[in-house]
Amino acid sequence: MNLDWKRFITDLTIDFVRHEVDPLRQVNPELPITTNFMETFEGLNYFKFADELDVVSWDATQLGMTQTTQPSKLFCSRSTMTLCVRSKVVSRSC
């Protein structure tokens, strides 16, 4: 049930993104479309956004970071967030 919910939410969010992106692409198809994702948020399947976005960035805020956050976890998160979505190059090194 939880997996079905995550798939539903991902599909719903992608549909929302499409409705936001389509008017921009109609005005200027060369305009790169970007958004911020949240580190390793498990509520959405970020890789499914590859067809809709040109650039994905990571919203690096201190919220949720603790003194015990390991540098390797941060590197893994940033590696996962390295999505060159239009060229379909996805870094899944972690």
Image: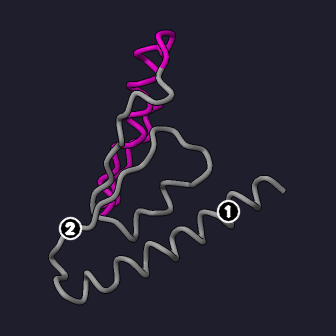
Q: CA distance from mark 1 to mark 2?
A: 26 Å
Q: Residue at x 44, y 72 (%)?
A: 17
Give the magenta range.
66-94
**Residue 3 location, x and y as percent?**
75, 54
> Which numbered circle lies on residue 32?
2
In the image, residue 3 sits, relative to residue 42, either above or below, namely below
Amino acid type assigned to the residue bearing label 2 in the image: Pro
Disc with the residue nearer the chain's start (1 vs 2)? 1
Residue kind at label 1, given as amino acid type: Arg
Question: Mark 1 Cα within 10 Å, few/some/many (few <14, many 20+)?
Answer: some
In this rendering, the answer to whether 53 lies above or below 36 is below
Q: Which residue is most to the right?
A: 1
Residue 72 tag number: none
Picture coordinates of residue 80, whole percent (x, y): 42, 39
- 56 within the magenta span: no
Q: Is residue 61 above or below residue 2?
A: above
Q: Between 60 and 74, which is closer to the camera in this rendering?
A: 60
- In the rendered structure, are the residues bearing label 1 and label 2 in contact, judged by CB atoms less than 8 Å apart? no
Left or right: 88 in relation to 5: left
> Pointer 1: what residue?
7
Q: Is residue 27 left or right of residue 4?
A: left
Residue projecting furthest to the front: 63
Q: Could you say where residue 71 lies in the image, as x and y percent from the top left?
A: 40, 15
Residue at 46% in and 30% down: 63
Q: Residue at x 49, y 54 (%)?
A: 46
Spot the residue most to the top.
Answer: 68
In percent of width and height, residue 70 lies at 46, 14
Q: Secondary structure at mark 1?
A: helix
Q: Is residue 71 above or below residue 85?
A: above
Foreground of the two, 68 or 84: 68
Assign the N terminus to one quadrant of the image.
bottom right
Mark 2 nearby-residue class (10 Å; few <14, some 14–19, many ≥20)? few
